[in-house]
C-alpha cells in the first residue's frame, strides 16, 4: 500500500507540491514570524517553493505579508535565501 504524500500549494506559483519541496513560514499567536523547518509549528502557515526566484518574488510583491496579515522582516527573507544556497 502506497503512503499518501501530503501536498501543499506554493502561495506564489499555486503549484501543488510535496511538503518536502516547500518551505513553511509561520505566524504564531503572538505575530512572531518563524521559518518552520519541521512543518509542525503551531500557527498560520504559508508555503513557498524551494526556489530563490520564488523567495525574491514573495519579498518584492509582499505576498507573505498579505497571506499572514503581518509585515515580514527582511531577515526572514535573508534566512530563506541562505537556506537555499
Image (cartoon, rainbow, N blue to C red):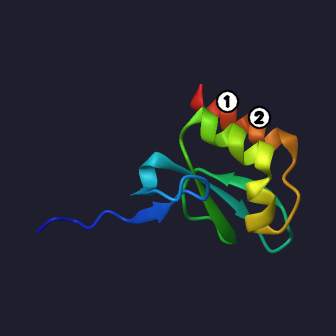
Q: Secondary structure at mark 1?
A: helix
Compared with residue 22, is residue 54 higher up or lower down, i.e. above or below? above
Compared with residue 11, is residue 1 higher up or lower down, i.e. above or below? below
Residue at the image point whose x is 11% and y is 68% from the top: 1
Observer-nearest residue: 10 or 35? 10
Quadrant of residue 66 within the rendered picture: bottom right
Residue with the most extreme bottom position: 29
Dot 2 alpha-carbon crowd within 10 angstroms: few under 14, some 14 to 19, many 20 or more: few
Residue with the most extreme left position: 1
Marks 2 and 1 close (CB-CB < 8 Å): yes
**Residue 47 numbered mark, or none:** none
Quadrant of residue 28 within the rendered picture: bottom right
Q: CA distance from mark 2 to mark 1?
A: 6 Å
Could you say where residue 2 lies in the image, as x and y percent from the top left?
16, 65
Q: Which residue is mark 2?
A: 78
**Residue 82 numbered mark, or none:** 1
Could you say where residue 4 lies in the image, as x and y percent from the top left?
26, 67
Residue at the image point whose x is 62% and y is 41% from the top: 54
Compared with residue 42, is residue 51 higher up or lower down, i.e. above or below? above
Q: Secondary structure at mark 2?
A: helix
Residue at the image point whose x is 73% and y is 66% from the top: 67
Compared with residue 24, is residue 21 higher up or lower down, i.e. above or below? above
Observer-nearest residue: 48 or 14? 14
Observer-nearest residue: 12 or 75? 12
Position of residue 80 in the picture relative to residue 78 (left or right): left
Amino acid at each position: 500500500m502506497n503512503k499518501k504524500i501530503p501536498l501543499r500549494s506554493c502561495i506564489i506559483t499555486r503549484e501543488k507540491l510535496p511538503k518536502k519541496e516547500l518551505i513553511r513560514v509561520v505566524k504564531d499567536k503572538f505575530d512572531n514570524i518563524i521559518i518552520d523547518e519541521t512543518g509542525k509549528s503551531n500557527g498560520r502557515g504559508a508555503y513557498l517553493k524551494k526556489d530563490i526566484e520564488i523567495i525574491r518574488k514573495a519579498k518584492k510583491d509582499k505576498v507573505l505579508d498579505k497571506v499572514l496579515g503581518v509585515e515580514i522582516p527582511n531577515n526572514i527573507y535573508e534566512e530563506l535565501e541562505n537556506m537555499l544556497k
